[in-house]
Amino acid sequence: MSTIDTLQKLLFDLAGVLPADTEPLFAMTTPVSLETNEAYIREGESSRRLAFIEKGVIRAYTIKENGDEATLLLRWEGQFIASHDTIINRQPSRFIYRALEPVKLLQIDYGVLEEILKTHPEYEPLRNFFLMKMLAESLKMLESFVTQSPEERYRELLSERFDLVNRVPDKYIASMLGITPVSLSRIRKRMYTKGKQ
Amino acid sequence: MSTIDTLQKLLFDLAGVLPADTEPLFAMTTPVSLETNEAYIREGESSRRLAFIEKGVIRAYTIKENGDEATLLLRWEGQFIASHDTIINRQPSRFIYRALEPVKLLQIDYGVLEEILKTHPEYEPLRNFFLMKMLAESLKMLESFVTQSPEERYRELLSERFDLVNRVPDKYIASMLGITPVSLSRIRKRMYTKGKQ
DNA sequence: TTGCGACGTTAACAAAAGATAATTTCAAGT
DNA sequence: ACTTGAAATTATCTTTTGTTAACGTCGCAA
């Protein structure tokens, strides 16, 4: 199933919009390809990009005051990715979005989407869907930070996203868990020596 | 300015809806009062409540496997509070929402709101506003967990929400920062003995 | 083949956090 | 004024994490 098919089905399921009636929306979308390590959004950029990931993994990270990187989240195929600083806060992005693998996206400018929604309110449920999905994921991650230890967060990530953990360098996983790569290495050792499955 | 005035102004600013045209919306809202320590939403509850806080502070927390509480977030006057499990995931709430002070709310059932939005799409920007606001706040908290130490998170909370920190028992602040009350006490001691402002 | 560089692991030490319990503080109620 | 109980602090000890540096592994390019 192609990306547009997937999104057309989503729009039909959410809002009963027939695929034939989605032309005004998809006419404004752009396919984008990224190479491994290519930046999708750079720090300081102001474009309000929203995209659906067809293939590949993107990492959103920021540069801390001390120069280190901190990975906020990872997104992969089937998910939306959005420059949240520019879309929500209308400020230049403090985050960098970079492809960890070759990536294929279907992109739309959020400003353009807003214009389309003014004349085509029937697409509105799609916006709510993506906002709610991002909110649910953010809250779930937040919950894990207040309820679990780094080791528990790693175990859960392994059990829920084993494929992802194996596709992404450990140092980015560590950073997303809020710890250093050294600490993650120790956690792994503890897990695999003491049979504490 | 009353709560309804505030929300009418918001609706006008966001969507150009005149206060006189907001009757269909506010007719379905209910004022709610909570006493100190009273639960607004209990664990396992399925009602999809969305409310605007007129006065007071509400704490959203969950009970961990070991029986301890973990505070996910605090909300106070001027903010929205929503039972996110029931609204987003349509599952019984795993969280408890409890008043830390006497609270006054203006409440609407999310299902009712959705019905109103079907016939009154002019209110739609209000839903986007509250979703985006919650998303922005969640991402900001998430960012603090991957970029800052517990001590730095506490310092930032003090500088940004000093009033809140003074209204809420330290143990809830600690939990929201992802640490124990004992640890927070040590951080405070470090801060106030060593003049490391 | 060799050398380079990024990544993960390991080691050693310092710093911070968790767990548990005792102690102090303080507000609320009798 | 006294008692009670919850909250915060302090103390002690254990565990985990941070920091820094060294070391091994692996893929890639010269």
Image: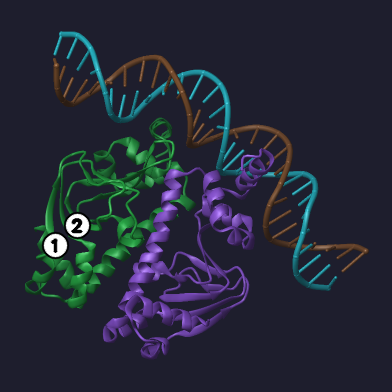
Chain colours: A green, B purple, C cyan, D brown
- Which mark, by number, is residue A20? none
Image spot of residue B39 (x, y percent)? 55, 72
Image spot of residue A29 (x, y percent)? 13, 61
Q: CA distance from mark 2 to mark 1?
A: 10 Å
Question: Horizontal placement of A109 versus D23: left or right?
Answer: left
- Determine if residue A14 is in view: no
Where does label 2 land, which residue? Answer: A52
Task: Between residue A167 and residue A104, name the one nearer to us.
Answer: A104
Q: Do the residues under discs 2 and 1 have CB atoms within 8 angstroms? A: yes
Q: Quadrant of residue A18?
A: bottom left
Q: Quadrant of the C terminus of chain B?
A: top right
Image spot of residue A193 (x, y percent)? 40, 30
Answer above or below: position of B52 versus B151.
below
Q: Amino acid at mark 2?
A: Phe
Query: Would you call the spot at circle 2 few (<14 residues within 10 Å), some (14-19), or many (20 or more)?
Result: many
Residue at image x 40%, y 67%? B84
User: N-terminal of the two: label 2 or label 1?
Assistant: 1
Answer above or below: position of A61 versus A87.
above
Task: Between residue C29 and residue A196, name the one nearer to us.
Answer: C29
Where disc 2 sits, the SS reads strand
Where does label 1 land, which residue? Answer: A6
Task: Between residue B54 and residue A146, name the one nearer to us.
Answer: B54
Q: Amino acid at mark 1?
A: Thr
Question: Horizontal placement of A6 versus B104: left or right?
Answer: left
Label 2: chain letter:
A
Query: Would you call the spot at circle 1 few (<14 residues within 10 Å), some (14-19), or many (20 or more)?
Result: few
Where disc 1 sits, the SS reads helix
Residue at image x 37%, y 47%? A156
